[in-house]
Amino acid sequence: MRGSGPADVFVDSNVLYSRTLLDWLGLLYVEPLVEPPFAVYWSDDVMVEVMHHLRKNNPTWPGGQIARFRERLESTFEVGRVRDYAIDGTYSGPDPDDAHVHAAATACRADYLLTCNVKHFDTKADDLVYEVIAPDQFFLLVDDVAPALVAAVVGRQIDYWMSRASEIDLGAQLERAGCPAFAQRIRAHLRRRAM
């Protein structure tokens, strides 16, 4: 992460929709033992996209289940809601539906725009206030500056899956979510825990 203090990270809907990416982001953000080196920002437009895809892919879920998902998201990242931004024509990427993401990230003066769709944003534009970053690279940065935080979350993930009498391969889960390099880091954390 760059600069002093926590980095401001605006999160795109595709990251919040992914169970694996959301679990890691949320657990890193709320870990009580280590201060996270980042603050999370989101907008209502991003939340609407998440809810749309959640309902579309789970048409039989009861309304309460959908509502609880949104409420947990909002309460976890409560202070990062970005409400006021203008879609002003400065978005220069290939997908006009992402103009609101650019506008909100610009409005909150994000250091990073965390998205699975890096190619949808003009990463060469000189006037961007944020750096576009994919989840794999973002989680590597977090591990670089706060390895104790990542190690604590690895422990929480193990406790969670053990309490469900489930075996889980955290590395494979991350690889499926598009984070192969971070998966290798997690395997290294797991090896250190086993020693």
Image (spheres, rainbow, N blue to C red):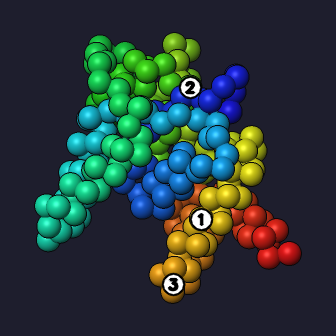
Q: Is residue 192 above or below residue 6?
A: below
Could you say which is closer to the camera, residue 2 or residue 156? Answer: 156
Q: Mark 2 sits on what residue?
A: 111
Circle 1 packing at 10 Å, graded few (<14), some (14-19), many (20+), is some
Residue 62 spot, x, y in % from top left? 14, 67
Image quadrant holding the N terminus, namely: top right
Q: Secondary structure at mark 3?
A: loop
Q: Residue at x 75, y 64 (%)?
A: 189
**Considering only vertical position in the picture, is 124 above or below 16?**
above
Q: Is residue 144 left or right of residue 132?
A: right
Determine whether 38 is above or below 32 in the image. above
The residue identified by callout 3 is: 166
Residue at 65% x, 66% y is 155
Q: Which residue is mark 1?
A: 156
Residue nearer the viewer, 37 or 15:
37
In-image side of 191 versus 46 (left or right) = right
Tell me whether circle 1 and circle 2 mark residues in contact (CB < 8 Å).
Answer: no
Q: Position of residue 99 (x, y in %)?
A: 32, 27
Residue 170 in the image: state x and y as whole percent: 60, 70
- Separation of marks 3 and 2 at Cα, in angstroms: 37 Å
Q: Which one is closest to the eye, mark 3 or mark 2? A: 3
